């Protein structure tokens, strides 16, 4: 656990240093976090971008397998949700996803069961924008990843494929939305949808409200989240978000925060 904590701290510290060193870069940051919705836009060619953060989902178990008088909770804690992006061309970028986290159960505020902190499946993939926005026609991109047990604690092959859309209604307001599927070896395929409303309060501050859902042949999870993104500098952004479940099988609450930065190639 100490080693994982050190790695997480080192990653965050390195990002801040890079952001300060590259503050004079002309590359302004645009991220895919913290929303569930992925933008159809590609980062600048030869630009390396780091997007990372913490989040926690909580499900209340009281009344399910426990008496109503017992305060029972299940938590999914992700200490570092990491996305690395590299621009190949104006239409294509490479992507790598990795998470470090654990799950635990609490009864009346006391931890009764807890998994070891470990890596989730590593996935690599691409995003390809094949339609540009024009009038009522949205910008459209195809986004896919595949992964396995490399640097992970168990689990089989996994993959996802989604189509990303965005309409910029004005200079301040945009609507973005995704549809897709998640594939997991030995499990049911999961369909997904997202709808995100973004509003720029100022050149540095953006707020969002989002609905999203995941469904398979046995259950459906529908949720909503909201949050803000603040541009500290042209290539360094922080974000904060929270949310709640809107269906029986969705987590009851969600909160998190993160940082993002990009590193332009020095001339």
Image (cartoon, rainbow, N blue to C red):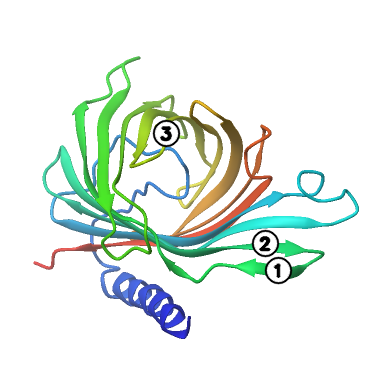
Quarter where residue 142 is shown: top left
Q: Could you tell me which residue is drawn at 52 percent across and 37 percent down?
A: 199
Q: Do the residues labelled 1 and 2 touch (CB within 8 Å)?
A: yes
Residue linked to disc 3: 188
Secondary structure found at label 1 = strand
Instruction: Report if residue 168 is visible in the image.
Output: yes
Residue linked to disc 2: 105
First-in-chain label (1 vs 3): 1
Q: Are marks 3 and 2 in contact (CB under 8 Å)?
A: no
- 176 or 74: nearer the viewer: 74
Q: Where is residue 102? Give x, y as percent.
A: 52, 64
| 3D distance between C-alphas at marks 1 and 3 | 29 Å
State left or right for residue 27 relative to residue 16.
left
Residue linked to disc 1: 112
State left or right for residue 45 relative to residue 108.
left
| 3D distance between C-alphas at marks 1 and 2 | 6 Å
Secondary structure found at label 2 = strand
| 3D distance between C-alphas at marks 3 and 2 | 25 Å
> Quarter holding the C terminus?
bottom left
Q: Where is residue 53? Give x, y as percent.
A: 46, 62
């Amino acid at each position: 656990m100490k080693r994982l904590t050190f790695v997480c701290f080192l990653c965050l510290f390195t990002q801040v240093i890079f952001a300060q060193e590259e503050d004079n870069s002309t590359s302004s940051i645009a991220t895919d976090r913290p929303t569930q919705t992925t933008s159809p836009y590609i980062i600048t060619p030869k630009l390396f971008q780091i997007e990372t953060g913490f989040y926690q989902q909580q499900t209340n178990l009281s009344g399910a397998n426990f008496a109503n008088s017992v305060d029972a909770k299940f938590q999914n804690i992700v200490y570092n949700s990491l996305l690395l992006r590299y621009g190949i061309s104006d239409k294509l970028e490479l992507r790598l996803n990795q998470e470090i986290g654990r799950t635990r159960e609490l009864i009346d505020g006391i931890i009764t069961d807890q998994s070891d902190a470990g890596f989730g499946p590593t996935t690599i993939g691409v995003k390809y924008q094949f339609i540009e926005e024009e009038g009522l026609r949205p910008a459209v991109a195809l986004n896919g990843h595949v992964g396995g047990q490399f640097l992970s604690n168990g689990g089989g092959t996994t993959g996802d494929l989604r189509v990303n859309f965005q309409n910029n209604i004005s200079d301040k307001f945009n609507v973005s939305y995704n549809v897709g599927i998640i594939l997991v070896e030995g499990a049911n395929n999961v369909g997904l949808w997202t709808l995100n409303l973004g509003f720029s309060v100022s050149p540095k501050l953006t707020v969002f409200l989002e609905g999203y859902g995941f469904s398979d042949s046995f259950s459906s999870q529908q949720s909503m989240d909201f949050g803000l993104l603040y541009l500290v500098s042209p290539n360094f952004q922080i974000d904060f978000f929270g949310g709640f479940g809107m269906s029986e099988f969705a987590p009851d609450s969600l909160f998190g925060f993160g940082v993002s930065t990009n590193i332009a190639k020095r001339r």
